[in-house]
Amino acid sequence: MNLEPYLARRQQQIDRFLERCIPSSHPDKLTQAMRYSLFSGGKRIRPILALAASDAVAGEASRVLPFACAIEMIHTYSLVHDDLPAMDDDALRRGKPTSHMMFGEGLAILAGDGLLTEAFRLMAEAAAKPGVDPARGLLVLAEVAKAAGARGMVAGQAADMNAENSVADLPTVEWIHIRKTGALIRAAVRAGALLGAAQSDQLRRLTRYADGIGLAFQIADDILDAEGSTAVTGKHSGRDQARRKATFPALLGLSAAKERARELLDNSLRELRPFPERAEPLRAIARFVVGRACPV
Ligand code: GRG
Protein backbone atom coordinates (compact mmCIF):
# COMPACT_ATOMS: atom_id res chain seq x y z
CA MET A 1 0.00 0.00 0.00
CA ASN A 2 1.18 3.51 -0.78
CA LEU A 3 0.82 5.24 2.59
CA GLU A 4 1.51 8.82 1.47
CA PRO A 5 -1.76 9.51 -0.39
CA TYR A 6 -3.71 7.78 2.38
CA LEU A 7 -2.08 9.97 5.03
CA ALA A 8 -2.59 13.10 2.91
CA ARG A 9 -6.31 12.33 2.44
CA ARG A 10 -6.84 11.66 6.13
CA GLN A 11 -4.81 14.73 7.15
CA GLN A 12 -7.04 16.88 4.94
CA GLN A 13 -10.20 15.41 6.44
CA ILE A 14 -8.86 16.00 9.97
CA ASP A 15 -7.69 19.55 9.18
CA ARG A 16 -11.09 20.47 7.73
CA PHE A 17 -12.84 19.25 10.85
CA LEU A 18 -10.40 20.96 13.22
CA GLU A 19 -10.74 24.15 11.20
CA ARG A 20 -14.48 24.12 11.94
CA CYS A 21 -13.86 23.41 15.65
CA ILE A 22 -11.45 26.30 16.17
CA PRO A 23 -12.15 28.73 13.33
CA SER A 24 -9.94 31.64 12.44
CA SER A 25 -12.97 33.94 12.60
CA HIS A 26 -12.19 34.51 16.29
CA PRO A 27 -9.28 36.94 16.03
CA ASP A 28 -8.39 36.97 19.76
CA LYS A 29 -4.86 36.09 20.87
CA LEU A 30 -5.92 32.93 22.69
CA THR A 31 -7.55 31.47 19.56
CA GLN A 32 -4.50 32.51 17.55
CA ALA A 33 -2.25 30.66 19.98
CA MET A 34 -4.46 27.54 19.95
CA ARG A 35 -4.55 27.54 16.14
CA TYR A 36 -0.80 28.23 15.89
CA SER A 37 0.00 24.90 17.50
CA LEU A 38 -2.95 22.97 16.09
CA PHE A 39 -2.07 23.87 12.49
CA SER A 40 1.72 23.86 12.59
CA GLY A 41 2.38 20.71 10.62
CA GLY A 42 1.66 17.82 13.00
CA LYS A 43 1.57 14.43 11.33
CA ARG A 44 -1.92 13.69 12.73
CA ILE A 45 -0.81 10.13 13.50
CA ARG A 46 -3.16 9.64 16.45
CA PRO A 47 -6.41 10.71 14.74
CA ILE A 48 -5.36 8.79 11.63
CA LEU A 49 -4.85 5.70 13.79
CA ALA A 50 -8.36 6.12 15.20
CA LEU A 51 -9.84 6.34 11.70
CA ALA A 52 -7.73 3.45 10.42
CA ALA A 53 -8.77 1.26 13.37
CA SER A 54 -12.39 2.01 12.59
CA ASP A 55 -11.73 1.11 8.92
CA ALA A 56 -10.15 -2.16 10.04
CA VAL A 57 -13.44 -3.24 11.65
CA ALA A 58 -15.59 -1.73 8.87
CA GLY A 59 -16.74 1.17 11.06
CA GLU A 60 -18.15 4.50 9.90
CA ALA A 61 -15.35 7.12 9.76
CA SER A 62 -17.67 10.11 10.21
CA ARG A 63 -18.64 8.85 13.69
CA VAL A 64 -15.01 8.58 14.74
CA LEU A 65 -13.82 11.90 13.33
CA PRO A 66 -14.83 14.15 16.29
CA PHE A 67 -13.19 11.77 18.78
CA ALA A 68 -10.11 11.47 16.56
CA CYS A 69 -9.81 15.25 16.35
CA ALA A 70 -10.33 15.61 20.10
CA ILE A 71 -7.36 13.28 20.63
CA GLU A 72 -5.27 15.46 18.30
CA MET A 73 -6.22 18.53 20.39
CA ILE A 74 -5.10 16.72 23.54
CA HIS A 75 -1.85 15.70 21.86
CA THR A 76 -1.27 19.32 20.79
CA TYR A 77 -1.90 20.63 24.30
CA SER A 78 0.60 18.11 25.67
CA LEU A 79 3.29 19.32 23.28
CA VAL A 80 2.64 23.00 24.09
CA HIS A 81 2.95 22.31 27.82
CA ASP A 82 5.89 19.93 27.38
CA ASP A 83 7.85 22.67 25.57
CA LEU A 84 7.38 25.20 28.40
CA PRO A 85 10.43 26.40 30.35
CA ALA A 86 9.14 24.60 33.45
CA MET A 87 9.15 21.30 31.56
CA ASP A 88 11.38 20.46 28.59
CA ASP A 89 12.17 24.11 27.83
CA ASP A 90 12.25 23.81 24.04
CA ALA A 91 12.37 26.72 21.60
CA LEU A 92 11.66 24.68 18.48
CA ARG A 93 8.82 22.33 17.57
CA ARG A 94 8.03 21.09 14.07
CA GLY A 95 10.77 23.39 12.82
CA LYS A 96 8.98 26.48 14.18
CA PRO A 97 9.24 28.55 17.38
CA THR A 98 7.31 26.90 20.21
CA SER A 99 4.08 28.43 21.53
CA HIS A 100 5.65 30.24 24.50
CA MET A 101 8.36 31.70 22.24
CA MET A 102 5.63 33.16 20.03
CA PHE A 103 2.97 34.14 22.56
CA GLY A 104 4.67 34.18 25.96
CA GLU A 105 4.38 31.60 28.71
CA GLY A 106 1.02 32.66 30.11
CA LEU A 107 -0.80 32.44 26.82
CA ALA A 108 0.94 29.18 25.90
CA ILE A 109 -0.33 27.63 29.14
CA LEU A 110 -3.83 28.90 28.41
CA ALA A 111 -3.71 27.72 24.79
CA GLY A 112 -2.94 24.23 26.11
CA ASP A 113 -5.75 24.48 28.65
CA GLY A 114 -8.13 25.68 25.95
CA LEU A 115 -7.27 22.80 23.62
CA LEU A 116 -7.64 20.22 26.37
CA THR A 117 -11.04 21.52 27.44
CA GLU A 118 -12.33 21.91 23.87
CA ALA A 119 -11.41 18.27 23.25
CA PHE A 120 -13.78 17.13 25.97
CA ARG A 121 -16.56 19.40 24.77
CA LEU A 122 -16.15 17.94 21.30
CA MET A 123 -16.34 14.34 22.51
CA ALA A 124 -19.31 15.01 24.79
CA GLU A 125 -21.21 16.65 21.92
CA ALA A 126 -20.30 13.82 19.56
CA ALA A 127 -21.48 11.22 22.08
CA ALA A 128 -24.89 12.91 22.17
CA LYS A 129 -25.29 13.05 18.37
CA PRO A 130 -27.67 10.75 16.50
CA GLY A 131 -25.85 7.81 14.96
CA VAL A 132 -23.51 7.32 17.92
CA ASP A 133 -24.61 4.98 20.69
CA PRO A 134 -24.36 7.38 23.69
CA ALA A 135 -23.11 4.62 26.01
CA ARG A 136 -20.33 3.77 23.57
CA GLY A 137 -19.50 7.44 23.09
CA LEU A 138 -19.22 7.96 26.86
CA LEU A 139 -17.08 4.85 27.22
CA VAL A 140 -14.65 6.24 24.64
CA LEU A 141 -14.66 9.64 26.33
CA ALA A 142 -13.80 8.01 29.67
CA GLU A 143 -11.01 5.97 28.05
CA VAL A 144 -9.50 9.06 26.49
CA ALA A 145 -9.72 10.89 29.83
CA LYS A 146 -7.95 8.04 31.60
CA ALA A 147 -5.27 7.83 28.91
CA ALA A 148 -4.59 11.56 28.96
CA GLY A 149 -4.82 12.09 32.69
CA ALA A 150 -3.13 11.35 35.97
CA ARG A 151 -3.03 7.60 35.37
CA GLY A 152 -1.83 7.96 31.79
CA MET A 153 0.06 10.66 29.91
CA VAL A 154 0.25 13.13 32.81
CA ALA A 155 1.58 10.37 35.09
CA GLY A 156 4.19 9.49 32.45
CA GLN A 157 5.26 13.12 32.14
CA ALA A 158 5.52 13.49 35.93
CA ALA A 159 7.66 10.34 36.20
CA ASP A 160 9.78 11.51 33.28
CA MET A 161 10.50 14.82 35.04
CA ASN A 162 11.28 12.95 38.21
CA ALA A 163 13.69 10.60 36.44
CA GLU A 164 15.73 13.42 34.94
CA ASN A 165 18.31 13.65 37.66
CA SER A 166 18.44 10.03 38.66
CA VAL A 167 19.54 6.81 37.02
CA ALA A 168 16.42 5.17 35.64
CA ASP A 169 16.54 1.50 34.65
CA LEU A 170 14.88 -0.08 31.63
CA PRO A 171 11.61 -1.11 33.37
CA THR A 172 11.23 2.47 34.67
CA VAL A 173 11.86 3.95 31.23
CA GLU A 174 9.35 1.54 29.72
CA TRP A 175 6.80 2.45 32.43
CA ILE A 176 7.23 6.12 31.52
CA HIS A 177 7.00 5.57 27.76
CA ILE A 178 3.89 3.40 28.03
CA ARG A 179 2.12 6.25 29.78
CA LYS A 180 3.67 9.37 28.29
CA THR A 181 3.41 8.27 24.66
CA GLY A 182 1.68 4.91 24.55
CA ALA A 183 -1.52 5.70 26.44
CA LEU A 184 -2.89 8.24 23.96
CA ILE A 185 -1.96 6.04 21.00
CA ARG A 186 -3.75 3.11 22.62
CA ALA A 187 -6.80 5.29 23.31
CA ALA A 188 -6.84 6.48 19.68
CA VAL A 189 -6.82 2.96 18.28
CA ARG A 190 -9.36 1.72 20.82
CA ALA A 191 -11.62 4.72 20.17
CA GLY A 192 -11.78 3.82 16.47
CA ALA A 193 -12.31 0.15 17.23
CA LEU A 194 -14.98 0.74 19.90
CA LEU A 195 -16.92 3.26 17.83
CA GLY A 196 -16.69 0.86 14.90
CA ALA A 197 -18.31 -1.82 17.10
CA ALA A 198 -15.28 -4.14 17.06
CA GLN A 199 -15.83 -7.66 18.37
CA SER A 200 -14.01 -8.47 21.59
CA ASP A 201 -11.24 -10.49 19.93
CA GLN A 202 -10.71 -7.71 17.38
CA LEU A 203 -10.55 -5.16 20.19
CA ARG A 204 -7.99 -7.21 22.12
CA ARG A 205 -5.81 -7.60 19.04
CA LEU A 206 -6.05 -3.92 18.12
CA THR A 207 -5.17 -2.96 21.69
CA ARG A 208 -2.02 -5.11 21.57
CA TYR A 209 -1.22 -3.67 18.14
CA ALA A 210 -1.47 -0.17 19.65
CA ASP A 211 0.65 -1.04 22.66
CA GLY A 212 3.41 -2.32 20.37
CA ILE A 213 3.52 0.72 18.15
CA GLY A 214 3.03 3.09 21.09
CA LEU A 215 6.28 1.95 22.67
CA ALA A 216 8.01 1.66 19.29
CA PHE A 217 6.95 5.24 18.52
CA GLN A 218 8.78 6.60 21.54
CA ILE A 219 11.86 4.45 20.96
CA ALA A 220 11.94 5.71 17.35
CA ASP A 221 11.63 9.31 18.59
CA ASP A 222 14.55 8.77 20.99
CA ILE A 223 16.66 7.21 18.22
CA LEU A 224 15.96 10.22 15.97
CA ASP A 225 16.93 12.55 18.82
CA ALA A 226 20.14 10.62 19.52
CA GLU A 227 21.11 10.52 15.84
CA GLY A 228 20.55 14.23 15.44
CA SER A 229 17.82 14.22 12.81
CA THR A 230 16.42 17.74 13.28
CA ALA A 231 15.32 17.66 9.65
CA VAL A 232 13.04 14.71 10.46
CA THR A 233 11.87 15.72 13.92
CA GLY A 234 11.70 19.50 13.57
CA LYS A 235 13.15 19.72 17.10
CA HIS A 236 16.61 20.45 18.40
CA SER A 237 18.33 17.10 18.54
CA GLY A 238 20.66 15.63 21.15
CA ARG A 239 18.55 17.16 23.91
CA ASP A 240 17.93 13.85 25.66
CA GLN A 241 21.66 13.25 25.99
CA ALA A 242 22.30 16.83 27.08
CA ARG A 243 19.73 16.43 29.85
CA ARG A 244 21.04 12.93 30.62
CA LYS A 245 17.62 11.52 30.00
CA ALA A 246 17.20 7.79 30.39
CA THR A 247 16.06 6.54 26.99
CA PHE A 248 16.19 3.20 25.18
CA PRO A 249 19.22 4.28 23.07
CA ALA A 250 20.99 5.58 26.20
CA LEU A 251 20.38 2.38 28.16
CA LEU A 252 20.70 -0.23 25.41
CA GLY A 253 22.81 1.47 22.77
CA LEU A 254 21.50 2.53 19.36
CA SER A 255 21.63 -0.79 17.63
CA ALA A 256 19.79 -2.72 20.38
CA ALA A 257 17.22 0.09 20.60
CA LYS A 258 16.57 -0.28 16.86
CA GLU A 259 16.29 -4.03 17.28
CA ARG A 260 13.70 -3.54 20.04
CA ALA A 261 11.70 -1.14 17.86
CA ARG A 262 11.68 -3.68 15.02
CA GLU A 263 10.65 -6.45 17.41
CA LEU A 264 7.71 -4.34 18.63
CA LEU A 265 6.75 -3.68 15.01
CA ASP A 266 6.72 -7.42 14.29
CA ASN A 267 4.54 -8.05 17.35
CA SER A 268 2.08 -5.38 16.23
CA LEU A 269 1.92 -6.74 12.69
CA ARG A 270 1.34 -10.25 14.04
CA GLU A 271 -1.76 -9.01 15.88
CA LEU A 272 -3.21 -7.78 12.59
CA ARG A 273 -2.84 -11.09 10.75
CA PRO A 274 -6.49 -12.17 11.05
CA PHE A 275 -7.67 -8.80 9.73
CA PRO A 276 -8.53 -8.41 6.03
CA GLU A 277 -7.20 -5.97 3.46
CA ARG A 278 -8.98 -3.04 5.09
CA ALA A 279 -6.46 -3.16 7.97
CA GLU A 280 -3.68 -2.34 5.49
CA PRO A 281 -3.42 1.33 6.59
CA LEU A 282 -2.77 0.16 10.18
CA ARG A 283 0.01 -2.11 8.93
CA ALA A 284 1.54 0.65 6.81
CA ILE A 285 1.37 3.19 9.67
CA ALA A 286 3.20 0.77 11.99
CA ARG A 287 5.99 0.34 9.42
CA PHE A 288 6.12 4.11 8.92
CA VAL A 289 6.43 4.83 12.66
CA VAL A 290 9.42 2.54 13.08
CA GLY A 291 10.81 3.13 9.57
CA ARG A 292 11.41 6.82 10.35
CA ALA A 293 14.17 5.80 12.74
CA CYS A 294 15.54 2.54 11.34
CA PRO A 295 15.22 0.40 8.22
CA VAL A 296 12.34 -2.10 8.48
C1 GRG B 1 2.57 18.04 29.35
C2 GRG B 1 0.90 16.44 30.36
C3 GRG B 1 2.01 16.69 29.44
C4 GRG B 1 2.47 15.65 28.73
C5 GRG B 1 3.51 15.76 27.74
C6 GRG B 1 3.58 14.28 24.68
C7 GRG B 1 4.40 14.60 25.86
C8 GRG B 1 3.81 14.43 27.21
C9 GRG B 1 5.64 15.11 25.74
C10 GRG B 1 6.23 15.43 24.43
C11 GRG B 1 7.64 15.01 24.38
C12 GRG B 1 7.76 13.69 23.79
C13 GRG B 1 9.09 13.27 23.28
C14 GRG B 1 6.76 12.92 23.74
C15 GRG B 1 6.77 11.61 23.19
C16 GRG B 1 5.69 11.52 22.22
C17 GRG B 1 6.09 12.11 20.95
C18 GRG B 1 7.15 11.46 20.18
C19 GRG B 1 5.46 13.18 20.57
C20 GRG B 1 5.58 13.74 19.24
O1 GRG B 1 4.53 13.17 18.54
P1 GRG B 1 4.40 13.28 16.98
O2 GRG B 1 5.68 12.83 16.34
O3 GRG B 1 4.25 14.83 16.82
O4 GRG B 1 3.15 12.58 16.57
P2 GRG B 1 3.60 15.68 15.64
O5 GRG B 1 4.49 16.88 15.55
O6 GRG B 1 3.59 14.89 14.36
O7 GRG B 1 2.22 16.02 16.10
Image (cartoon, grey):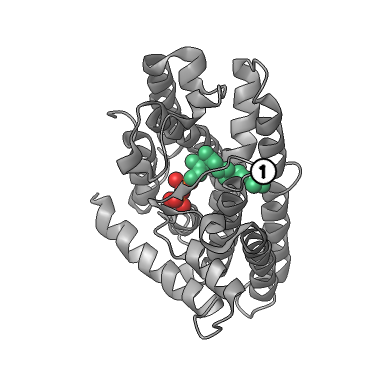
Residue at x 42%, y 39% (from the top left corner):
236
Residue at x 41%, y 34% (from the top left corner):
237
Name the residue nearer the viewer: 229 or 205: 229
Name the residue at the right extreme: 150
Task: Let me know if residue 186 appears in the view.
Answer: no
Whether residue 31 is situated above or below residue 182 in the rendered picture: below
Q: Position of residue 83 (x, y in %)?
A: 56, 47
User: Is 96 placed left or right of 29 in the picture?
Assistant: left
Name the residue nearer the viewer: 284 or 231: 231
Q: Which residue is mark 1?
A: 86
Name the residue nearer the viewer: 99 or 153: 99
- Quadrant in which residue 67 is drawn: bottom right
Q: Position of residue 48 (x, y in %)?
A: 44, 57
Circle 1 Cα neighbour tier, 10 Å, few/some/many (<14 / 14–19 / ≥20): few
Name the residue at the bottom extreme: 25
Whether residue 282 is situated above or below residue 257 in the rendered picture: below
Q: Position of residue 66 (x, y in %)?
A: 56, 69
Whether residue 142 is situated above or below residue 213 in the rendered picture: below
